[in-house]
Image (tube, helix red, strand yellow):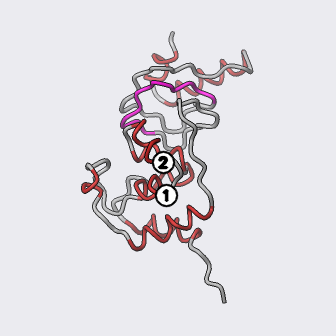
Amino acid sequence: MSDIEELKKGPAIWNAYADANIKADLTWCPDLRGADLRGADLRGVYLRGADLRGAHLEGADLEGADLEGVEAGLIIPTFSLNQKARVAVAVRGECYNQSDFGNVCGTTGCLAFHIVKQADGGEVFAAWFRSIPFAAMLIWPEAAHLFYQTDPKPVIEFTEQFMPKDKA
């Protein structure tokens, strides 16, 4: 059975398949180059070291997926503490409607656009994936659960830890 056929069965089946292959060969990594994974449920899926160059990932749910070392054809931008602080400030002062930016995710005050906007090379990265929320997940994975929030409260609570501290 091909990797893609296994992946279509869902996260639990895929993770069992990945685990078996890892045990058989420690150098194994998913070869998903050019795979059509649009809209796939990839929550919590093992994708460490996967070759996703040319893969179609629009609308894929990657919450909690292991994306370490993923080869996606572009270098994932680094996201510094200073940039996280800028995002934290921005989500408090720039509550805009995402539909103004091509209705990428359709939520108000979406954190994803702020993250992509603040990251080095983020816009290029998002354009390559054609998905601002997906690019944001790869740039700042620990915030992935916030990218489709319609309620700004969880976003504000999460980013509170990155707010610049007042110098007394």
Q: Secondary structure at mark 1?
A: helix
Q: Is residue 40 above or below residue 93?
A: above
The residue type indicated by label 1 comes to Gln
Nearer-the-camera pick, 149 or 91: 91
Mark 1: few/some/many CA within 10 Å (<14, 14-19, 20+): some
Instruction: Give x and y (percent) for residue 49.
Output: 63, 29
Q: Is residue 74 left or right of residue 151?
A: right
Q: Say which residue appears at 38% left-offset and 41% top-offset.
A: 131
Q: Say which residue appears at 60% left-offset and 64% top-offset.
A: 82
The residue type indicated by label 2 comes to Gly
Q: Which disc is residue 62 wearing?
A: none
Mark 2: few/some/many CA within 10 Å (<14, 14-19, 20+): many
Name the quadrant containing residue 152: bottom left
Q: Is residue 46 magenta?
A: no
Q: Are marks 1 and 2 in contact (CB under 8 Å)?
A: yes
Circle 1 sits on which residue? Answer: 118
Identify the main secondary structure in magenta. Answer: loop
Q: Is residue 158 above or below residue 78?
A: below
Q: Quadrant of the C terminus?
A: bottom right
Name the quadrant containing residue 107: bottom left
| Magenta segment boundaries in residue numbering | 49-61
Cα separation between marks 1 and 2 = 7 Å
Name the quadrant containing residue 167: bottom right
Q: Secondary structure at mark 2?
A: helix
Q: Is residue 7 left or right of residue 48?
A: left
Q: Which disc is residue 122 wearing?
A: 2
Q: Is residue 53 magenta?
A: yes
